[in-house]
Amino acid sequence: MISIFRNFVNKVLRSLFSKKKHVKLGLYGPPNGGKTTLANRICQDWLGEDMGKVSNIAHETREVQIKEQINIKNSEGKELSFNLVDTPGIATKIDFEEFIRAGLKEKEAKQRAKEATKGIIDSIKWLDEMDTVIIVLDATKDPLSQVNITIIGNLQARNIPVMIVANKIDLRKASIKKVQSAFPQYEVIGISAKFGKNIDQFYEALFAMAG
């Protein structure tokens, strides 16, 4: 049943990439999973520039960011073109005190909490604009969190094709198998966006989706 579902998803993705000129490829996931790090890796590889700022403090990305017309090629000379959309991390709760504990002053912490909340709302709204979504998860953390289940549920309700990236495999506690076991209906690619490990495998997975 799972393989049938995957084949259906791949068929849908191939149709999207072949018919649409400006496919919107969205990066979604919880805060600090590595979405912007992956976005920067993609943009550096193919455009020679970063897409956004990265921070160890959660919710550094608080607005939807778009990089248009990214063209990637594989070893066989095939090309893939898409607009990359990096979204703010989705969380079920925003507490300004968490930002204070991270070193921000109270006024700045409250402002960031307000902006982060708006960013989450915008991320959910933007789901209706996505042609396909890459969920970026921290492979060192429990994949069956309330946030991840909420994201997956929103995508399934909208019938949006999904690929899951298990990021941070350079870290000792990372487990791709846990992510695969949590979401067996989706293809899971293990990478380190920070160091570029398995990034070629990630690109090949995109080409495989496109047929």
Image: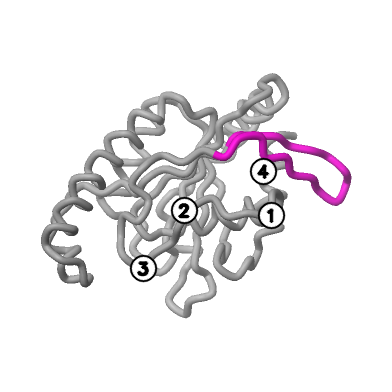
Q: Which of marks 2 and 1 is nearer the N terminus?
A: 2
> On the image, numbered disc 2 is attached to which residue?
35
**Magenta stretch encompasses residue 73:** yes
Q: What residue type is labelled 4?
A: Leu
**Residue 56 numbered tag:** 3
Q: What element carries label 3?
A: loop
Task: Classify 10 Å Cα crowding around label 4: few (below 14), some (14-19), many (20 and above).
Answer: some
Q: Is mark 2 on a helix, strand or loop?
A: helix
**Residue 206 numbered tag:** 4
**Magenta stretch encompasses residue 195:** no
Q: What residue type is labelled 2?
A: Lys
Secondary structure that dominates the magenta span? strand
Q: Which residue is drawn at 54% across and 44% down?
A: 163
Q: Which of marks 1 and 3 is nearer the N terminus?
A: 1
- Name the spot of residue 75 as percent of width and height, x first: 85, 51
Mark 3–mark 2 Cα distance, whole angstroms, equals: 13 Å
Q: Is mark 4 on a helix, strand or loop?
A: helix
**Residue 48 numbered tag:** 1
> Which color scheme is applied?
one colour
Asked if the residue under mark 2 is in contact with the one under mark 3, i.e. CB atoms within 8 Å, the reply is: no
Q: Give the range drawn in magenta.
A: 67-83
Q: Earlier in the sequence, mark 3 or mark 2?
A: 2
The residue furthest bottom is: 172
74 on left or right of 56: right
65 on left or right of 3: left
Mark 2–mark 1 Cα distance, whole angstroms, equals: 18 Å
Q: Which amino acid does label 3 sit on?
A: Asn
